[in-house]
Image (cartoon, helix red, strand yellow):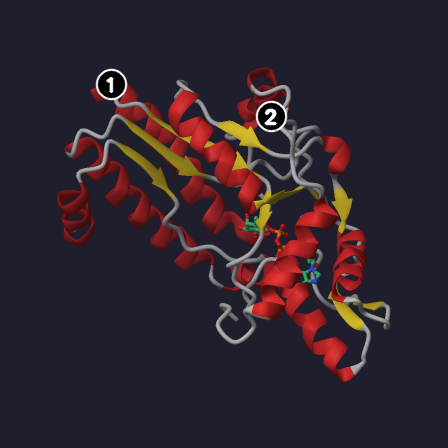
Amino acid sequence: MAQARRVFELHRPTHVAHLAAMVGGLFKNMKYKLDFLRENLLMNDCVLECCREFGVSRCVSCLSTCIFPDKTTYPIDETMIHNGPPHDSNFGYAYAKRLIDIQNRAYHEQYGCMFTSVIPTNIFGPHDNFNLQDSHVIPGLIHKCYIAKQKDEPLTVLGTGSPLRQFIYSKDLARLSLWVLREYHEIDPIILSVGEEDEVSIREVALMINKAMGMKQGIQFDGSKSDGQLKKTASNSKLRKYLPDFKFTPIQQAIDETVQWFCENYDTARK
Ligand code: GFB
């Protein structure tokens, strides 16, 4: 808490985008459920309490669609956050993030604070974490594809490749988050996602990465590894009511740019 206070003391912010978090892909989440819970609870409490103490006028925190109930109707919308247990693979992270919504409401009711949250789907882009074990699926497969190409071997995809995901490009999320910080005046969260029609399978994503990397070899699957949640299809109708014309970057173009960034920055990339 003292460290957080020193940062607020130094910068005296009026607006805060709370992006501090312990994050990771499916396999890291499955391994460190307690750490994900404790680390994120501690960081969230520090940041939100400093925002209140220093009179910050707007704070936007970042959740994730993995926090929604696993047994639910689709598409998921913002009203369903607390309607049941999240998927078992990431309950530590999910409950810590759900509590931010509770904290925002409590800060608003007790102190009138204008703290809110965004709920993006799976994020990827340049500067990501490309660690082979702990990363999310797209940076993980990009790193694996880079190695497979050098060995002229097929790309090995973990699981069956059939789970479905909606992916948001980090540059699109940054633009939308600035809009939320400036123009969105609700305490209730808002899902930031491409439409349901842009949901893709892990298999399709792997093929897009292969194409972007110029791989000659195909892909193969390691069915002994977990698929995690099969789908978490989210509705972006609340976002579309506010921003009907917002243009998301096409996923193949976003993957091409991320692959190019990784290849150009291989030596210094997080991995
Ligand atoms: O991004 P990811 O790790 O997390 O994606 P989730 C996992 C899906 O990709 C699973 C498949 O279906 C995996 O079987 N997959 C295939 C791989 N190959 C790979 C690989 O090399 N690495 C990884 N990581 N996956 C996370 C939550 O769930 O979503 C986090 O656990 C967070 O808390 C994040 O919310 C956005 O989409 O399954």
Q: Quadrant of residue 74?
A: top right
Q: Are marks 2 and 1 in contact (CB under 8 Å)?
A: no
Residue 83, visible in the rendered structure:
no
Q: Mark 2 or 1 closer to N-term?
A: 2
Q: Amino acid at mark 2?
A: Asp
Res 76 label: none
How many C-alpha atoms fall within 10 Å of the one at disc 1: few (<14), some, or many (≥20)? few
Local SS, label 1: loop
Local SS, label 2: loop
The residue at which mark 1 appears reads as 112
Name the residue furthest top: 241
Question: Residue 201 appears at what percent x and percent y?
Answer: 78, 48
Question: Left of 45 or right of it: where is 80?
Answer: right
How many C-alpha atoms fall within 10 Å of the one at disc 2: few (<14), some, or many (≥20)? some
The residue at which mark 2 appears reads as 77
Q: Residue at x 68, y 54 (%)?
A: 255
